[in-house]
Amino acid sequence: MKNNLITDSTRLELLKTMILLRRFEEKIIEVYGRQEMKTPVHLYIGQEAIAAGVCAHLRREDYLFTTHRSHAHCLAKGADPFALYAEFYGREAGCCRGMGGSMHPAFPALGILGTSAIVGGGIPHGVGTALASKLRGDDRISVVFFGDGASEEGTFHESLNFAALKVLPVLFICENNGYATVSPLSARQPTPHVVDRARGYNINSLQVDGNDVEAVYTATQSAIAHIREGRGPAFIEAMTYRWKGHVGTEEDWNKGARSKEELEQWKEKCPLKRLCNSMESTLTSNKYDKLVAGTDASLDEALQKAVTADFPPVGQMNEFLYRKGEY
Amino acid sequence: MPWTSVCLNKKDIACFAKQRVRTLSYVEAILEAQQIILEQDPEAFLIGEGINDAGGVFGSTKGLSDTFDQRVMDMPIAENGLTGVVIAAAAAGMHPLLIHMRSDFLPMSMDQLVNHAGKWHSMSGGQVSIPLVVRSIIGRGWGSAAQHSQGLHSLFLSVPGLKIVLPSTPYDAKALLLAAWQDPNPVLVFEHRWLYDNIGPVPEGTCFLPIGKGVVRNSGTDVTVIAVSHMLPMAMEAAQALKQDGVSVEVLDPRSIAPLDMELIAESVEKTRHLVICDVACKTAGYGAEVVTRLMEHNPGTLQGPVKRISFPDLPTPSSPALEEAYYPGTPNIITAIKETLSHQIVHT
């Protein structure tokens, strides 16, 4: 059924974003075997609808916190692919000058102040920036992405409780891909719906098909309207699936973690394919190929520039221990 | 100036009254520092369990919520999550002071302090720092037992990126807290409950001490006694007592254990050649172990007597008053330690 709340031009923008997120990581897969990109990569392929659909509603100054699986959220918020690639190659031109790698990107100008790779570690951070916004009376909102595994951490509950208590402008996005590394949700939680926990804190919550970018887009639109009206936090559980293993560039069905059939079923629900189907009347395959080719050209250039960039000076790690001077 | 002096009795306090030097208690100094912070800095806020109740964290936040309202915030019993909340508020440029009524609650904050606050500036390539202050109070006595009386400061010594201060006088309580507020990095301030009523000279308005610099509290030539927090008054008593016996004791207060003022310590020990280290924590892997290692790395021939450590035994704190009395070291222990190190000469060959 066609989603009447979305225009064709929005669909096209969402498609462009998802192509960027997908191709950005497929480029990593192409070069990773050369062992020059020495950073543990946690790929987002299969989940692109969530980052694209949510970030389409964010302003540049809004805060965003992501996880070890961080690439897509940064890109969808506007990060320069070169700054990420250079960071993954450990170069001085990287977004964190080679101090953070794949798991800790920071783009303060985009509201990405830093990234935790401790599961659940970043959830309170989104609440903290939301508290700052509330105390300052500014209109920046905070969005925090995390997985189903993080919902088992104490910080998840502590953060939801405090955000609801203080009526803070924060959007929680739980990307439920069904697995924490290789442990299925059923081995870890007594009920299958994380969203039920959020409702327990009296937070405006809903569950959405995380592979349907249009559904994510419209759900986020209403959640953010609620937040910007000053009515407190909102929570979206987006159901999705991770195509690759927890870390690295390989699929993991052959390691016995999960079945190939399950993966194939989810690949049928590819978020890009689904949006293309929905755009059938306006998107020819020729036009799609051109979009991909354009994205590839700029990513190839970024990647090439990154792999040939300079390494940072060794002394910088001493420099970054403490910030000098007064705040 | 009187600011480095330590008042041990009513006579010392009366002396300042005669000179018309203002004195405050340690807790009044902390309260005044926070008042200044909240008045001068609209980006500062205080948060902690029960900080705006009538008692106000042993009086150290008493009345602040009347003036500063929502910038003095009670919080849910959720130490780790709320530490994460204030860390990110700091990353966004605010200046939070998180207050744990007991240092024993710091392990609940451990993930956010160790994995996040201490590393943020470095991991972000120097882009974002965490101007956070965490106050916590080391308890003692009245059967507080093992979960309400720990000195856990040295646990954080092996975490780069955190600063750790232990004020021992009312002046230091104010000046180090104000310095922590001005510091763009996370600073853990360990107060001691048994120092709260101690009186000393404290100037009005702002005053700052550089974090990472220690102070000579009493000059001497025979032995160096390093003492932090509640150990300092006892070390000063020991120095006074031994003066009558002709022993010249140099008492050093490092004020902060991260960074550690090794320059001051090495200078003193090279003069006295004897060292006693006093801590308000269990002995093993305390800051004293780091002091001695660094001294030995630099100049292994420095010491002419055995190092003596005055600290809590490596045991959880007991509750019974009879056991507490045996557990905690006091001035006589410091005196004995000084005598022992001076009587036992090491000959370096």
Image (spheres, rainbow, N blue to C red):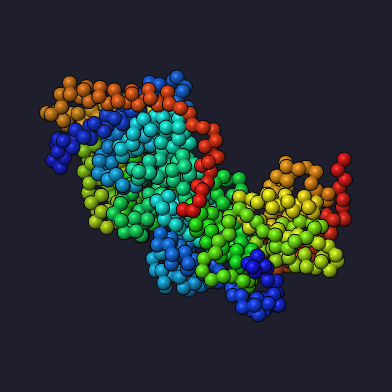
Quarter of the image holding residue A231? bottom left
Residue B14 lies, with reference to residue B78, above or below; the image says below
Horizontal arrangement in the rendering, residue A22 relative to residue B306 (left or right): left
Quarter of the image holding residue B96? bottom left
Between A144 and B128, the one nearer to me in the picture: B128
Q: Quadrant of the C terminus of chain B?
A: top right
Between B198 and B11, the one nearer to me in the picture: B11
Horizontal arrangement in the rendering, residue A137 relative to residue A156 (left or right): left
Residue B49 lies, with reference to residue A38, above or below; the image says below
Between B291 and A26, the one nearer to me in the picture: B291
Q: Residue furthest top?
A: A34
Q: Give residue B163's position: percent from left, percent from top.
A: 56, 51
Q: Give residue B343's position: percent from left, percent from top.
A: 87, 55
Q: Is residue A201 visible?
A: no
Query: Which residue occupies 31% across, 59% down?
Result: A137
Q: Is residue B200 visible?
A: yes
Residue A30 lies, with reference to residue A183, above or below; the image says above
Query: Which residue occupies 53% across, 41% down?
Result: A319
Q: Residue furthest left?
A: A281
Between B179 and B87, the one nearer to me in the picture: B179
Q: Quadrant of the N terminus of chain B?
A: bottom right
Query: Which residue occupies 23% across, 51% down?
Result: A225
Quarter of the image holding residue A147? top left
Query: Which residue occupies 76% across, 52% down?
Result: B269
Horizontal arrangement in the rendering, residue A155 relative to residue B321 (left or right): left
